[in-house]
Image (spheres, helix red, strand yellow):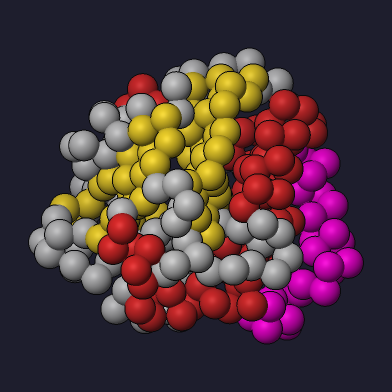
């Protein structure tokens, strides 16, 4: 399948990039490894100068609020996955979803880059970062039968049949989520602007290393953006 970024996104966010990584996660068995990552996460972030009091002063966290404002939503209500993750962490709300999800969440926090994942068997056709159509439907994960009607300023990941992630990286759909039955996943690393702490490429390398440490088999990875707007993931 192809992963791509629409030209209209690049007109408004010329430094936008999508890091992508395809991996077989069926052999993941690294619960102890991810628990150790989570246990050390706050201290490692503090060593980076990131705390509950300072995180919003870091441009790699703060500037996502500008992106969300540009999508026409209130950024204090709709937060990037990175900001939401850091807020949970500093409140002591350590998540435990699965070794794979916990792993990429830790890598996301440490690299100050939003990350997500989709079950490749649930994706249809290609995956594109684009603007939503006005009134287009989104079915959010963890929200029961609720449906979101999108607005045209909002940026989404979509395959040929559905929206897979709403507001760039705010929430995934229940129809493409990684779960206990997922064998192969497509991981996403988001960048909307030139970052200061870690590049998308560095974030991908860290993700590949940690996924391998918990028993996943990384097959292929790459980056799309202004220089190369699409890539073949197979």
In terms of depth relative to the viewer, which is nearer, 38 or 74?
74
Residue plotted at (40% across, 74% down): 68
Pinpoint residue 158: horizontal percent, then vertical percent.
28, 45
Main SS of the magenta part reads helix
Residue 70 visible in the snapshot: yes
Residue plotted at (36% across, 72% down): 12
Q: Is residue 209 above or below residue 115?
A: above
Image quadrant assignment for residue 83 = bottom right
Pinpoint residue 200: horizontal percent, then vertical percent.
62, 52
144 falls in the magenta region: no
Q: How many numbered tags mark residues here? A: 0
Considering every residue shown, the one lying at the far top of the view is 27
| Screen quadrant of the N terminus | top left
> Left or right: where does residue 151 sit relative to residue 28?
left
> Left or right: where does residue 149 sit relative to residue 70?
left
Residue plotted at (15% across, 59% down): 133
52 falls in the magenta region: yes
In terms of depth relative to the viewer, which is nearer, 2 or 167?
2
| Numbered range of the magenta stretch | 34-58
Pinpoint residue 53: horizontal percent, then vertical percent.
73, 82
> Left or right: where does residue 74 sit relative to residue 47?
left
């Amino acid at each position: 399948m192809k992963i791509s970024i629409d030209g209209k996104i690049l007109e408004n966010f010329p430094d936008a990039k999508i890091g992508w990584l395809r991996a077989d996660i069926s052999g993941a068995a690294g619960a102890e490894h991810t628990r150790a990552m989570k246990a050390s996460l706050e201290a490692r972030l503090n060593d980076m100068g990131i705390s509950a009091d300072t995180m919003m002063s870091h441009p790699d966290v703060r500037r996502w609020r500008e992106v969300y404002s540009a999508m026409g939503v209130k950024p204090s209500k709709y937060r990037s996955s990175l900001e939401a993750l850091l807020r949970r962490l500093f409140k002591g709300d350590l998540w435990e979803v699965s070794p794979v999800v916990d792993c990429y969440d830790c890598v996301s926090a440490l690299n100050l880059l939003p990350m997500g994942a989709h079950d490749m068997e649930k994706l249809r056709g290609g995956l594109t970062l684009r603007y939503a159509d006005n009134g287009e439907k989104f079915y959010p994960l963890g929200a029961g039968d609720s449906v979101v009607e999108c607005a045209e300023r909002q940026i989404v990941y979509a395959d040929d049949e559905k929206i897979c992630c709403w507001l760039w990286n705010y929430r995934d759909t229940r129809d493409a989520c990684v779960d206990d039955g997922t064998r192969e996943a497509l991981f996403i690393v988001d960048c909307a602007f030139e970052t200061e702490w870690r590049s998308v490429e560095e974030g991908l390398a860290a993700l590949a290393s940690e996924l391998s440490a918990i028993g996943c088999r990384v097959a292929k990875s790459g980056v799309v953006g202004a220089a190369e707007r699409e890539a073949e993931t197979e």
